[in-house]
Image (spheres, rainbow, N blue to C red):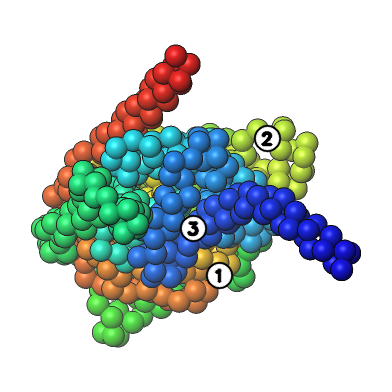
């Protein structure tokens, strides 16, 4: 009996000794897991899925994780949120080059989200914290869109909202205002739930905090409803019939570039097939034709054979064609759109301005070469940047050119519209990324841009998905992937400018200033609290 009593006594002593340790681990692991899972939830809200409505709950959980914590805890939890979001979102970057570049990109980009987490934790103690916290998120996106290497805006919250009720806000203030509304709604959702639970537990009602929570939820939704008046697909300057050519490629992957002549032939052949259909009366005669990026990686200015192929196709269809070419001029390479007249040949060009690091040019070439010679072999010569907006006059219509990667950058799209574009073309080449989600993520960007600037957007892609997008963001036609096809449609031309077009970067600057004000307030309050404690 004595042994049994002693055993029971020892058990009683062990339980309270281990319980605090278990609770301490739970306090660490539960928020960490919730941060990573809420980042994953945000990823699931992005295309090709149409689960846009998951973004506010993702930020609600993120708000629960961060509220009231130290900035150091926010830094770590923000990094986990960033990994949960960006690891699956950007997996396509490693489709052909392996996991190394993909993981390196995510590790770097998640640092920005970590800093946002620290900032949100800091401002979460302030009155009206959902507003400050949402502004901090947009400030993080603004930084990520600019550094390093000219920035990487992929994964902006706005780009996951092409199917959502908040989309009209893109016409009010572009991607910063659209993203701010979604994040504010998420943080407001958590604050409303928190205050509701607090009231049930204590009976305490805090009217000001409750009002902030309700406004954080309601204003974004009501603002989006009111902004619908800015969204229209009506023609203001008449209409044009546009053809987008998707010639396809012999096979996906980086080695499609070694089959340059085949890719050119495929696009010429599809254009000639369309011409035959037009002649037979089965398809409407287009006013002009749009080819994708890299549809002629053989320089037609230096190669008479390539020039003849393009010229033959242009003459067959009988209207101007915008050709995506790789051109060498004065010893420099350019990713170029070439306006090809069926009678005069090339008459205008646009050189891509926002070129892709590690794809079209190699930063830190000597350092990268010392680590991996294969990478420098793949990017043997850097592309040079264009300096001027590209707006082609095609059969009287002003067509703004935004080449592939440029669609992710606010300034690159807006500059074409302010330069007079009545519609936008986003010629792209996604063959390198096989059947990954990349093409759908980029297509969603083009839909957001259509609403942001109230312009028809055409997306001719080498291997798909090519699409016709109306100024209200709706896709009216699209192709499959890795098929030869063409899209022909009458589309509206528009010249009025949305508030987002007119305001440009100003809404983003305003939100960054709000974030800075909140962070300054939080830092000042913390310093005053420590001084009072010392006294």
Q: Foreground mark, 3 or 2?
A: 3
Count neighbours of disc 1 (C-alpha within 10 A) and say few if under 14, some if 14 to 19, many if 20 or more.
Answer: some
Q: What residue is shown with label 2? A: 365
In percent of width and height, residue 79 lies at 56, 45
Residue at horizontal 27 percent and vertical 33 percent from the top:
510
Q: Is residue 358 left or right of residue 455?
A: right
- Nearer-the-camera pick, 489 or 356: 356
Dot label at residue 9 = none
Q: Is residue 410 left or right of residue 440?
A: left
The first of marks 2 and 1 along the sequence is 2
Q: From where the camera sits, is residue 506 visible?
A: yes
Q: Foreground mark, 1 or 3?
A: 3
Q: CA distance from mark 1 to mark 3?
A: 26 Å
In percent of width and height, residue 234 lies at 12, 64
Position of residue 318 relative to residue 507, above or below, is below
Which image quarter holds the N terminus? bottom right
Residue at horizontal 57 percent and vertical 60 percent from the top:
88
Q: What residue is shown with label 1? A: 435
Q: CA distance from mark 2 to mark 1?
A: 29 Å
Dot label at residue 38 = 3
Residue at horizontal 44 percent and vertical 56 percent from the top:
61
In percent of width and height, residue 280 lies at 30, 85
In percent of width and height, residue 448 lies at 31, 57
């Amino acid at each position: 009996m004595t042994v049994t009593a002693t055993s029971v006594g020892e058990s009683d002593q062990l339980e309270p000794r281990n319980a605090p340790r278990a609770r301490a681990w739970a306090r660490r692991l539960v928020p960490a897991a919730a941060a990573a899972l809420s980042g994953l939830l945000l990823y699931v809200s992005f295309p090709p899925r149409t689960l846009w409505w998951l973004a506010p709950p993702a930020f609600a959980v993120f708000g629960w994780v961060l509220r009231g914590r130290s900035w150091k805890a926010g830094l770590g939890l923000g990094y986990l949120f960033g990994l949960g979001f960006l690891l699956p979102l950007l997996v396509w970057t490693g489709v052909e080059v392996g996991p190394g570049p993909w993981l390196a990109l995510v590790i770097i980009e998640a640092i920005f989200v970590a800093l946002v987490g620290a900032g949100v934790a800091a401002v979460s103690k302030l009155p009206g914290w959902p507003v400050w916290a949402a502004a901090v998120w947009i400030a993080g996106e603004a930084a990520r869109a600019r550094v390093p290497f000219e920035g990487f805006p992929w994964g902006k919250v706005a780009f996951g909202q092409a199917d959502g009720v908040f989309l009209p806000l893109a016409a009010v203030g572009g991607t910063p205002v659209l993203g701010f509304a979604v994040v504010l709604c998420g943080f407001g959702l958590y604050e409303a739930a928190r205050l509701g639970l607090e009231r049930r537990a204590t009976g305490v009602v805090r009217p000001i905090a409750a009002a902030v929570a309700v406004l954080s939820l309601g204003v974004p939704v009501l603002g989006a409803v009111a902004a619908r008046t800015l969204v229209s697909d009506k023609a203001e300057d008449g209409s044009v019939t546009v053809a987008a050519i998707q010639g396809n490629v012999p096979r996906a992957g980086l080695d499609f570039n070694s089959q340059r002549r085949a890719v050119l032939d495929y696009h010429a052949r599809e254009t000639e097939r369309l011409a035959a259909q037009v002649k037979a009366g089965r398809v409407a005669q287009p006013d002009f034709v749009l080819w994708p990026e890299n549809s002629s990686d053989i320089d037609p200015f230096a190669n008479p054979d390539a020039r003849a192929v393009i010229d033959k196709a242009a003459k067959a269809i009988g209207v101007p064609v915008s050709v995506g070419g790789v051109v060498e001029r004065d010893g420099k390479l350019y990713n170029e759109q070439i306006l090809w007249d069926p009678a005069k040949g090339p008459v205008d060009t646009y050189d891509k301005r926002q070129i892709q690091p590690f794809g079209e040019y190699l930063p830190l070439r000597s350092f990268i070469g010392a680590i991996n010679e294969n990478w420098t072999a793949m990017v043997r010569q850097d592309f040079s940047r264009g300096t001027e907006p590209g707006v082609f006059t095609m059969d009287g219509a002003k067509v703004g050119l935004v080449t592939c990667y440029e669609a992710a950058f606010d300034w690159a799209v807006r500059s074409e519209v302010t330069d007079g574009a009545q519609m936008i073309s986003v010629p792209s080449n996604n063959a390198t990324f096989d059947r990954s989600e990349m093409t759908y993520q980029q297509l969603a960007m083009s839909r957001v841009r259509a609403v942001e600037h109230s312009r028809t957007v055409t997306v001719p892609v080498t291997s798909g998905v090519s699409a016709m997008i109306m100024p209200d963001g709706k896709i009216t036609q699209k192709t499959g992937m890795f098929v030869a096809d063409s899209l022909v449609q009458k589309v509206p031309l528009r010249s009025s400018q949305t508030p987002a077009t007119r305001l440009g970067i100003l809404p983003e600057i305003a939100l960054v200033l709000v974030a800075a004000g909140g962070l300054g307030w939080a830092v000042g309050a913390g310093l005053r609290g420590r001084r009072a404690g010392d006294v």
